[in-house]
Image: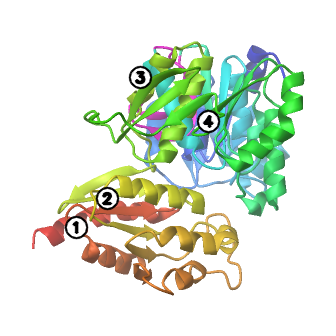
Amino acid sequence: MTDAAPSDRLARIGRVHFLGLAGVGVSAVARVMQAQGVPISGTDAKDLPVLDEFRTSGVPVRVGYRRENITSVEQEAGARIDTVIASSVAQAGNPEYDEAVRRGVRVLHRSEGLAAVMDARRGVAVAGTHGKTTTSSMTATLLDAAGLRPGFAVGASVAGLGTNASAGEGEWFVAEADESDGSLLNYRPEIAVITNVEADHLDHHGTPEAVHRVFVDFTARILDGGTLILCLDDEGARELLADVADDLAARSVEVMTYGRSPEAALRLTDDPEPGRRIPDGAAQTFGIEEDGRSVRASLSVPGGHNALNALASVAVGRRTGLSLEDSAVTVGAFRGVARRFDLQGEAAGVRVYDDYAHHPTEVAALLTAAREAVDPGSRVHVIFQPHLFSRTQEFAAEFSAALRTADTVAVLEIYPARERPVEGVTAALIADPLFAGDRPPRGGLQGREEAVRTVVGAAAPGDLVLTVGAGDVTALGPRLVEALSAEGSR
């Protein structure tokens, strides 16, 4: 990335054509640029509803990647394309990408486009192996509820804000910073949040050491005099802090730690006061301590991991000038985010949720939260779809261990996403040990319709059903609600 004066870099981008316009990451950048007056167009492989939003506002849109789309869009717009911004999946070999390169058009990754937008703002970049979408969404919600009107671009639509991205009007801009492809290194934030550091995306990084290294490099991107907010409960984050402490001190970067650890500057206390009632609409309450002061906060989403995410957001609030009390109150405005413990509906007394969890640590945290969300004696039923052959191969045993805490588990075949099949790697690597041994959960390795029948047949009033994974398992949520409703009407 080439550093430039904020207004200069965005101005040099000129007219932008987006590849992968319907994707959540690319659409976020497109929305923000469009709101700031940048003329845009775009293409996606599928005609998804988000494209209608752009069409309605007069954006030239194409469906299906073709070399001639570049010329076609230019003719419709009456102007040449200056820059192509591409998603991680629209790279060399994509006909429009290749045509842009052939013509000498500037080609940027979506994170570079977002970084250009953030140049003119005070940036908050939220990174971490897990929790970055929820934490960045909570942070944008907190700052908005406090009246700071931030810009933001995150990896899912945020309930309460109504979108995944907004240019905002205030001085702050919140961005989700993705380590999966190393694109977090395109940002130069004033405030950086690191929720945790754990091995993942080894198809890109290769080794756990390389994952650690990319977070080290990310801390070096924090502006001198800025702030690093880091979870002290996480072993990987603690190791990272030890490695970068000298560099941060030399550049006057403040470190603000959070967590349950008594050493954390902002500390989470879980125990409610005796007899304290959880407010209506809240799934949990918890205490926050800082410098001997204590306040309480409430969240509409369950799970200790979400309490920690909220604590990270409160830490950002403190560093943007809010009081501890105001930060604790405004984080309660968060109402969830798409595909993160996302309620799909309720039928026959059974609630159906969808979640994007696709790493063993995330699955384990999700199931813990699910147990907290049901009454004692009620059960949790899961349809799980592994995501990527490489991740399944690397973490099969850990997935099995995490899923064993559910009462019913239907395991679907692997969602390949960008990967080609790997010989010998199937969902059976997870399912076989999961259903072996003493007291395994009910279920098995199943097809989609069989999985729906299994879960619906096992569910009773008061139970909770989860569709889990980063693939198309999310489509089964409405199907489960429909099937439960039909079952309950018999």
Q: Residues within 10 Å of mark 4 (few under 14, many from 20)?
A: some
Determine which residue is flagged by label 2. Answer: 352
Mark 4, residue position? 262
Tell which circle, 3 or 4, labels the residue nearer the N-terminal end. 4
Upstream in the sequence, badge 2 or badge 1?
2
Label 3 neighbour load within 10 Å: few <14, some 14-19, many 20+: some
Q: x%, y% of residue 390?
A: 70, 70
Crowding near pointer 2: few (<14 within 10 Å), some, many (20+)?
A: many
Q: Position of residue 456 (x, y in %)?
A: 27, 73
Q: Amino acid at mark 3?
A: Val
Identify the residue shown where x is 69% and y is 73%: 420
Location of residue 195 by image quarter: top right
Q: Which residues are magenta?
A: 147-168
Identify the disc placed on residue 329: 3
Instruction: Name which residue lies at 36% across and 38% down.
Output: 300
Q: Nearer the viewer, mark 1 or mark 3?
A: 3
Sequence-wise, the earlier of marks 3 and 2 is 3
**Residue 56 visible in the picture:** yes
